[in-house]
Image: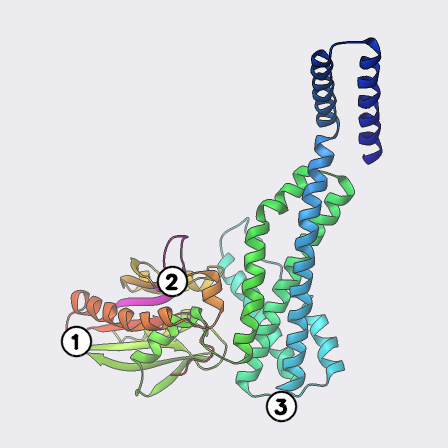
Amino acid sequence: MLYNLRTIMLLTIDFSAALQITGLPSSDLITAIYIASFVVLTVVSLLFATSIQASQMLGQIGRNLIKFEGYKDKSRQELLSYLTGSCKVPLSDAAREVDRIIEYFTIMPEGMDPAGVVAKMEQVIRLQDDRTRQEIKELAPTADRVQQSVAQNMLEITSALSQIYKIVRHFYLSGQKMKNPYMLAQIQMNMPILLREAEAYYGSLETFVQAQPIGDGIGEMVAGKLMQGRETQVIARETLYAKSEYKGRTLLVVKAEGPLGTVGMPDAAVQKLTQDPLNKISMLIMVDAALKLEGENSGEIAQGIGAAIGGVGTEKFRIEEAAVRNKIPMYAVVVKESLIDAISVMTKEISESSENVIRIIQNLIEKKAAESDTVLIVGVGNTIGIGQ
């Protein structure tokens, strides 16, 4: 392409020299040069516009690809440092197992026939989680439960960064090979989102290493405050509940077992508690973090109706199923956060919002539940660094 452009420039110079030989006036000569330049640029644009556009996009994607590769390599190194340092795993074993585990993939079940698809997804997701847990336990048998949960979270982050890097690399190399601007445009349009996600994931590693609370744990923090000083009981795997009381109403408060880096099984807890005929639950309140829109402030609180829980949808389905079967109204209280806030150290604004959330919950209970009623409150999120 450079050779063709250089040739065109030389032809333009030769053309202007030829005009000078003809003895045309200088004003006419300048006009002729302008016309010739316009024609040349138009031809160049028509012939090489697609290639020029593809080259520009390739350059931008290539520069960002280097960033993604850096996040991938640094996250792997930090995971290895944690395994060899805190978990006392030999470096050779840690490197070999980490490189193997981050290549795991999960094939979601076929959804063509929707009957039973939730149960299929639950089985696949649970098997994936169980396998990763078992791999960490076998790799770091001397580590305690908190350290193993931290290692699992770090492994999931490293795996996510590796997948993002591979996807960007795939589009970059395919576009480089085919010079197809439409293929490159797909990844270029999503580049700001991918970069923000990668930066957030990588920045959260240090938070997990130190086992500090993250923004996503605000629901767990609220539940922990409501059950503080009460005896807790195991209701599901890594999930606890406690009985409390507020102005004549019985409160059943559910949260994941802290300070592990886990979300527990809130759906299983809701199903078991609602099935118990002794509970007679009259309302369900769920507390979770929610992704804020641009222009909204972190720590803002919003109220709504329904099951406030993320994920692939299986947990939400089970909670809704239990509530509908027992005719229990569902209320949601969420704290607005950005993606970076959700997986980074919990900020002061988000932490202080917990007291306002508790006041909102108490107000809901007073308005919607009669005295002697039982209210089920579920804190949702990753409870790393948040005890009971």
Callout 1 amino acid:
Ser
- Residue 293 is left or right of residue 33, and the answer is left
What residue does disc 2 label?
298
**Which mark is on residue 372?**
1
CA–CA distance between discs 1 and 2?
A: 36 Å
- Which residue appears at 38% of the width and 66% of the height? 288
Front residue (pair 114, 24)? 24
- The reply to whether residue 109 is visible in this rendering is no
* Residue 295 belongs to the span the image colors magenta: yes
- Which residue appears at 74% of the width and 30% of the height? 48
Callout 2 amino acid:
Ser
Front residue (pair 80, 388)? 80
Residue depth check, mark 1 versus mark 2: number of the one nearer the observer: 2
- Which residue appears at 71% of the width and 79% of the height? 94
Front residue (pair 9, 140)? 9
Callout 3 amino acid:
Thr
